Image: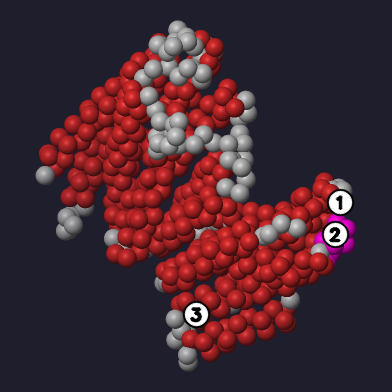
């Protein structure tokens, strides 16, 4: 059992490393250079998958929070909080790569556009989630329950924030993947993009696995310390 | 020792590493004036190699960091189970 | 005791306390007024600019004042052990939530009503032609604000930092209210239809009143 897990972990790590290397090659050499934007367009292969992972991570936090409230099993709490912290990191990447791309292409670092602003608001919500969690007592069920409620309420806010900000005119490029007249990616770009999406998702899964195990270890250490304090 | 340090500061290392993944290579792209070296009709631009190398380096560092976490956790789990056994009583 | 009479009893208790001490109302109103005053000093807006930024200023003041009010109602309950006593009452948890929500809405609305006339004087605005829709807009925004705020204040009160964390989580949560209120009021000033703002606020209110209703029981357990 334990041996199997070690093998799976090693294989997963090797696979991730290989996929990351292939991903970089696909992005920089396989996908053609964009005609007007040039090299800076490559950021798209990092920016969009990061955004996807951030939203996925927050959605999983939402689901796991509901799961925790329904079942009160620690596993759900670990999954929810780990996912939220990873999502916050990827959300930070989105917020950093966006302005780097926007500066040469739009000529400005930032604009108060629907997608940009809602990502920023999202970032604030989940930073607050992590902050609240870090100031709650680790023992007992209080931390899990209260952060689960914040995880649910915070995610419910996402569509509302997006809807409300859409009143301002939106400057963000329309999704080019979804199709529509005149949109669509060059096939090699598309391949690189979807590969990158898969690699980022894999990276998320691997980090989530380690993060959850880490918080499991934390719990065990906490329990041992508690025992020593009592004796 | 190392394992516990790695474990304790894991989230912050991760934040730093993942942000580095993106910022550092993009600095390279900027410094070597990425946008102006476009060849009409596509094909890799002159400084693609540098950007690629920078990304490869940082992503490599990230991967090695993941491996370090993996090893640190393994060591820590072993020590924990030894501790939990040695404290006597039930091993639950 | 039925849920409804329980709700009325809690509400009556809260209003009675507030009527005798007037702590929350005085601090909220003064805080809102001071915010309006400070912003007026800082920007010294002309009449045209006021129409543009006025609603935003007003709602920033309300949000700050509302946060103070939420912290206040909770801290009085905590000091006297009131929340424990409430939880011991044979009432559904959601009844307590609704009672607290309604009490907060009432206090905040009164503070707003006291602030708006001063705002009108300071900024030379004529609100009379669209006073009705404006107040309805404010009421809807206040309900949403308190629906989220009542829940989150109980959560943050249980952290080591007490109330410090409340604005940090509450302000990003109320972005839609702020935008809807600002855009809606702006539309009223320009003579456009504020239907979009109303629709958004109603959706927001429903989502978070139901969300608070469903999760409040978890927040106050133990």
Q: Is residue A178 above or below residue C180?
A: above
Q: Are marks 3 and 1 in contact (CB under 8 Å)?
A: no
Q: Is residue B80 above or below residue A229?
A: above
Callout 3: residue from which chain? C
Q: Is residue C83 in sight in this rendering?
A: no
Q: Position of residue A108 (x, y in %)?
A: 63, 28
Q: Position of residue C193 (x, y in %)?
A: 68, 59
Q: CA distance from mark 3 to mark 1?
A: 46 Å
Identify which residue, B14 or B19, lies in the foreground.
B19
Q: At x 51% / y 34%, what residue is drawn?
A: A173
For the C terminus of chain A, the quadrant is bottom left
Callout 1: residue from which chain? C
Residue range corresponding to the magenta coloring: C117-126
Q: Are marks 2 and 3 in contact (CB under 8 Å)?
A: no
Q: Are marks 2 and 3 on the same chain?
A: yes
Q: How is the image coloured?
A: secondary structure
Q: Earlier in the sequence, mark 3 or mark 1?
A: 1
Q: CA distance from mark 1 to mark 2?
A: 8 Å
Is A169 on the left or on the right of A224, as rendered? right
Is A99 on the left or on the right of C210, as rendered? right
**Main SS of residues in magenta:** helix
SS label for mark 2: loop
Q: Position of residue A13 (x, y in %)?
A: 24, 31
The crowd level at tag 2 (other Cα within 10 Å; few <14, some 14-19, many 20+) is some
Q: At x 27% / y 26%, what residue is drawn?
A: A19
Q: Is residue C190 above or below residue C9?
A: above
Q: Quadrant of residue A46?
A: top left
Q: CA distance from mark 2 to mark 3?
A: 40 Å
Identify the residue under disc 2.
C125
Identify the residue under disc 1.
C47
Callout 2: residue from which chain? C
């Amino acid at each position: 059992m334990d041996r199997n897990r070690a093998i799976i972990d090693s294989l997963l790590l090797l696979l991730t490393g290989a996929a990351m290397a292939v991903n970089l090659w696909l992005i920089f050499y396989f996908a053609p250079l964009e005609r007007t934007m040039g090299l800076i367009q490559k950021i798209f292969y990092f920016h969009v998958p990061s955004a996807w992972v951030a939203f996925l991570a927050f959605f999983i936090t939402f689901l796991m929070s509901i799961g925790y409230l329904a079942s009160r099993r620690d596993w759900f709490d670990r999954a929810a909080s780990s996912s939220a912290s990873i999502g916050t990191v990827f959300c930070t990447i989105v917020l950093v790569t966006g302005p780097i791309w926007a500066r040469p292409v739009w000529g400005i670092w930032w604009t108060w556009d629907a997608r940009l602003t809602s990502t920023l608001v999202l970032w604030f919500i989940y930073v607050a989630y992590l902050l609240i969690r870090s100031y709650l007592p680790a023992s007992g069920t209080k931390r899990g329950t209260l952060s689960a409620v914040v995880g649910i309420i915070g995610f419910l806010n996402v569509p509302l924030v997006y809807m409300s900000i859409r009143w301002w005119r939106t400057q963000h490029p329309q999704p080019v993947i979804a199709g529509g007249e005149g949109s669509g990616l060059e096939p090699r770009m598309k391949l690189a993009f979807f590969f990158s999406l898969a690699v980022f998702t894999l990276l998320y899964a691997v980090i989530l696995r380690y993060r959850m195990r880490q918080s499991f270890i934390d719990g065990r250490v906490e329990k041992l310390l508690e025992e020593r304090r009592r004796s | 020792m190392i394992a516990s340090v790695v474990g304790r500061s894991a989230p912050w290392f991760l934040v730093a590493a993942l942000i580095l993944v993106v910022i550092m290579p993009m600095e390279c792209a900027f410094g070597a004036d990425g946008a102006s070296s476009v060849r009409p009709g596509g094909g890799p631009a002159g400084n693609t190699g540098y950007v690629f190398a920078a990304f490869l380096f940082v992503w490599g560092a990230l991967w090695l960091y993941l491996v370090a976490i993996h090893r640190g956790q393994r060591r820590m789990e072993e020590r924990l189970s030894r501790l939990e056994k040695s404290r006597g009583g039930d091993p639950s | 005791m039925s849920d409804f009479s329980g709700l009325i009893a809690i509400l009556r208790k809260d209003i009675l306390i507030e009527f005798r001490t007037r702590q929350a109302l005085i601090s909220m109103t003064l805080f809102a007024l001071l915010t309006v005053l400070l912003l007026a000093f800082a920007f010294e807006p002309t009449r045209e600019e006021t129409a543009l930024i006025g609603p935003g200023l007003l709602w920033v003041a309300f949000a700050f004042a509302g946060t103070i009010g939420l912290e206040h109602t909770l801290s009085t309950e905590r000091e006297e052990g009131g929340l424990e006593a409430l939880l011991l009452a044979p009432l559904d948890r959601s009844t307590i939530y609704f009672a607290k929500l309604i009490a907060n809405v009432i206090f905040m609305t009164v503070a707003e009503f006291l602030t708006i006339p001063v705002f009108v004087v300071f900024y030379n605005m004529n609100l009379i032609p669209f006073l009705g829709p404006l107040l309805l807009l404010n009421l809807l925004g206040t309900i949403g604000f308190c629906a989220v705020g009542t829940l989150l204040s109980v959560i943050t009160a249980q952290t080591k930092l007490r109330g410090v964390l409340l604005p940090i989580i509450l302000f990003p949560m109320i972005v839609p209210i702020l935008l809807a209120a600002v855009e809606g009021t702006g539309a009223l000033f320009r003579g456009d239809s504020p239907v979009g703002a109303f629709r958004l606020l109603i959706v927001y209110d429903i989502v978070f009143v139901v969300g608070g209703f469903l999760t409040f029981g978890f927040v106050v357990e133990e």
